[in-house]
Image (tube, rainbow, N blue to C red):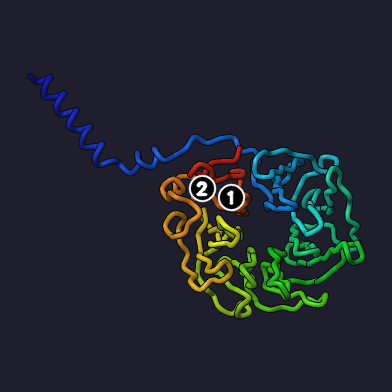
Amino acid sequence: MRFIRLVFFFCTFLSFTACNQDPVFYAISLEVEPRDPRVQGTPTAMVTFDGTLYVASRFSNTIYRTDGSAWDSFSSEDGKAIIELAATTSGIYALMGDVKTTELWKYNNSSWSLVTNNTSYTQLQTIYGVGTDLFIGVMKSPSSYAILLYNENGTGNIEILENNTGGILTGAASDGTTVYLGTAGGVYKFESSTLTSVKNINVCGMITVGTTVIAATTNGIYSSADTFATQHTSVSCSGALALYGTGSSPTLLLVGLNGGGYGEIQIENGSTITNWSVYAPGDGDPSSISDYDQYSVSLEIYPLTSLKHFKNILFASTLQKGLWSYRDSQWNTEE
């Protein structure tokens, strides 16, 4: 009789726990088996050129590329360490070297060519392409920074654009007429080969939505629509920004968040933001994913350095945890 009572109690306990699932066990059930990422460590920015996505692991000597179906790779010049990638309308560029001496190289289908640097600066640290222009951030000293400019249609050499900025170059974007540059010390306007200070904010990333340039900061998001005067939302951004949409027009602005993961801001008519509310992935309509719970135990844990929606696949570069992608309704490392 005692044995029967014990069996009855045990079965009743299992039935109870099945109906009242412990949140810890539920979270574990959502986790997917981690895979070895194809691009390990901290990836560079993801850039696209001629229908192909390019990305590398910082300080490695391999660049990976995909057309959306399969991946292949190629090496840097003479095995040099890759610092960062950028793209213009004419091609792919890479900063190669180390933190003290860095060179700018252009990839020409199967080989690399060195871009002449006519300045005395050797610590080239960041690069951003807008149209035919390539903007380069330089650290002159731990507290002194400059911006360089390279345009193939110009002199063909790297030239000094601004000798003193309040921080390292962190972004560049155009509203269709004017190019804006973001630095850790403020926003600058680039017109007629002249750089003019616009707003003193700590920019960590820039992107264009329609005809408006968005500047993300650690204290919120600003836009060129009002000359970056209004703090539209107070979220703390990591600098990762991307447009998301299943059709020809984007429906979401994805914003990397300090602390991990990203948020979603809705875009109206493919070009306008009027509601600056930041939704968690899976909570808004539309959304970039279908299940917040699975995201919460995977990508949301890690700080993001770059986001890209390419060929209906959402990619995310993480800090030290490699390149991730959203496939089959799950976030996992990209194999």
Q: Nearest the camera: 325 or 310?
A: 310
The residue at the point 79 percent across, 49 percent down is: 98
At numbered mark 2, what does the secondary structure look like: helix, strand or loop? helix
At numbered mark 1, what does the secondary structure look like: helix, strand or loop? loop
Q: Is residue 229 above or below residue 76?
A: below
Q: Looking at the image, how many numbered discs can be counted on the residues? A: 2
Q: Which residue is tagged 2?
A: 299
x, y percentage for residue 46?
67, 51
Is 46 on the left or on the right of 88, as rendered? left
Q: Is residue 82 visible?
A: yes
Q: Is residue 226 above or below residue 136?
A: below
Q: Is residue 305 visible?
A: no
The residue at the point 73 percent across, 42 percent down is: 60
The residue at the point 81 percent across, 48 percent down is: 97
x, y percentage for residue 103?
84, 53
Q: Residues within 10 Å of mark 2 (few under 14, many from 20)?
A: many
Image quarter of residue 172? bottom right
x, y percentage for residue 59?
73, 45
Q: Which residue is tagged 1?
A: 312
The residue at the point 58 percent across, 53 percent down is: 304
Q: Nearest the camera: 314 or 302?
A: 314
Which kind of residue does numbered mark 2 sit on? Leu
Quadrant in which the N terminus is drawn: top left
Tags 2 and 1 touching, CB below 8 Å: no
User: On residue 26, which mark appears?
Assistant: none
Is 7 on the left or on the right of 248, as rendered? left
Is 3 on the left or on the right of 60, as rendered? left
